[in-house]
Image: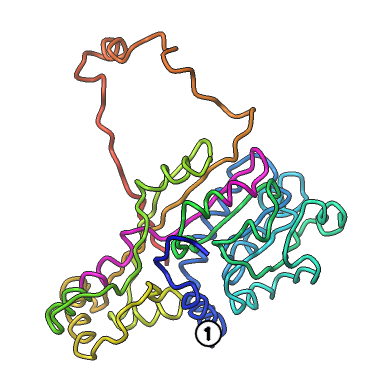
């Protein structure tokens, strides 16, 4: 159990279970499917093979479906040469959906997955289609299930924003990666649902004279690089996408959030919000964020992280003080001191998820 308690993990597990088994659950997978496709592209961009991989917080197995669609570089396994993918999730309900394209680990292997097991069963790593196993495991407690230096690749698709102690989870991911293994993940960022958050707070303050959290706190893009470095990853890479999705109204948006299993799970939330407060929030949302067609827009910020487990073959920084030229000299060459330090321009990628 994490010492940093922000979210009620039992509530989050119940939300994921309910969302996974609800009729029509697949209709609410659009965001995870879109991000899974982006992560699969990033695996394919790396010109090497990752025979044994782990999907942390696999939900309905979106990454496995995409990895299995194309053969690896050598014609064996799926995208990235993945031959075996272990899919783990906190929710047994989510794993039921993932099992549609997977098989369950043998009973004696449920607690720990070891390299020796894969080596002793070479048949599970052969063929053009990768094998997938499912395992019920909490993202906050990976080291209880997996040995150190086990996986070539660890993936995570929109799951880590619900862990209580993200630095600890990243350190565990780093530990279970083999040297020169890579972590590729995506999670929702702090700019997600800013419209809904502000409208709920204003409506609650106006109608009830106080405010309480209705959406979860999340990391920001500026945090992620530091978190990866602190966890022991090398060559950390962080970027973001901002998706703006239209919904018929604020109530439809809140229905989708619940159906995704992304409802509020902050510890000790307010027990009830009045009908008048929700109506006021919906009216504010329509007024401030409505479109000409009568729909409303919701923002989802997605943060992408890539980090490598250290290895001697990786590029290393030069020793401090070993530089042979100063920035002043660079500025002189480029046209003067005014050009020596160009402004850093930050930009956001905006994509249409439809």
Q: Residue at x 52, y 81 (%)?
A: 25
Q: Residue at x 81, y 55 (%)?
A: 118
User: Is-magenta flag for residue 195?
Assistant: yes
Q: Residue furthest bottom?
A: 275
Kindly indicate the quadrant of the structure image that contains residue 256: bottom left
Q: Which residue is drawn at 57% across and 84% down?
A: 21
Mark 1 element type: loop
- Front-most of residues 271 and 78: 271
Q: Badge 1: few (under 14), some or many (20 or more) residues near its Cα, within 10 Å?
A: few
Vertical relation: 256 (above or below) 341 = below
Position of residue 351 measured from the top left corner of the image (x, y, whole percent): 38, 57
Vertical relation: 206 (above or below) 157 = below
Residue under label 1, please give it: 24
- Front-most of residues 46 and 328: 328
Position of residue 100 measured from the top left corner of the image (x, y, whole percent): 69, 75
Magenta-colored span: 172-199
Vertical relation: 28 (above or below) 309 = below
Q: Which residue lies furthest to the front in this view?
A: 3
Position of residue 350 measured from the top left corner of the image (x, y, whole percent): 35, 55
- Is 137 placed left or right of 252 in the picture? right
């Amino acid at each position: 159990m994490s010492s940093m308690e922000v979210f009620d993990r039992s509530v989050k597990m119940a939300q994921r279970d309910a969302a996974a088994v609800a009729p029509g659950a697949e209709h609410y997978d659009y965001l995870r499917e879109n991000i899974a496709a982006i992560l699969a592209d990033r695996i394919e961009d790396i010109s090497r093979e990752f025979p044994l991989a782990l999907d942390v917080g696999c939900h309905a197995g979106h990454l496995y479906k995409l990895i299995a669609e194309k053969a690896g570089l050598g014609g064996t396994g799926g995208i990235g040469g993945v031959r075996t993918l272990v899919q783990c999730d906190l929710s047994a309900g989510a794993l039921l959906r993932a099992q549609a394209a997977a098989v369950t680990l043998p009973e004696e292997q449920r607690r720990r997955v070891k390299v020796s097991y894969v080596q002793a069963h070479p048949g599970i790593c052969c063929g053009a289609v990768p094998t997938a196993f499912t395992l019920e495991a909490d993202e906050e407690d990976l080291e209880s299930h997996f040995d150190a230096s086990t996986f070539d690749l660890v993936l995570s698709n929109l799951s880590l924003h619900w862990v209580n102690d993200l630095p600890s989870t990243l350190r565990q991911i780093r530990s279970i990666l083999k040297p020169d293994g890579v972590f590729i993940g995506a999670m929702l960022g702090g700019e997600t649902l800013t419209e809904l958050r502000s409208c709920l707070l204003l409506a609650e303050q106006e109608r009830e004279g106080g405010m309480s959290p209705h959406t979860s706190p999340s990391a920001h893009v500026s945090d992620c690089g530091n978190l990866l470095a602190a966890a022991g990853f090398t060559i950390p890479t962080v970027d973001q996408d901002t998706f703006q999705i239209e919904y018929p109204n604020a109530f439809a948006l809140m229905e989708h959030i619940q159906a995704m299993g992304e409802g509020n799970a902050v510890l000790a939330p307010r027990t009830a919000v009045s009908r008048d407060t929700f109506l006021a929030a919906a009216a504010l949302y329509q007024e401030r964020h409505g479109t000409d067609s009568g729909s409303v827009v919701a923002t989802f910020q997605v943060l992408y992280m890539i980090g490598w487990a250290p290895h001697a073959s990786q590029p290393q920084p030069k020793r401090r003080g070993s530089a042979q030229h100063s920035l002043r000299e660079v500025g002189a060459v480029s046209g003067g001191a005014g050009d020596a330090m160009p402004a850093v321009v930050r930009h956001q990628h905006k994509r249409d998820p439809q």
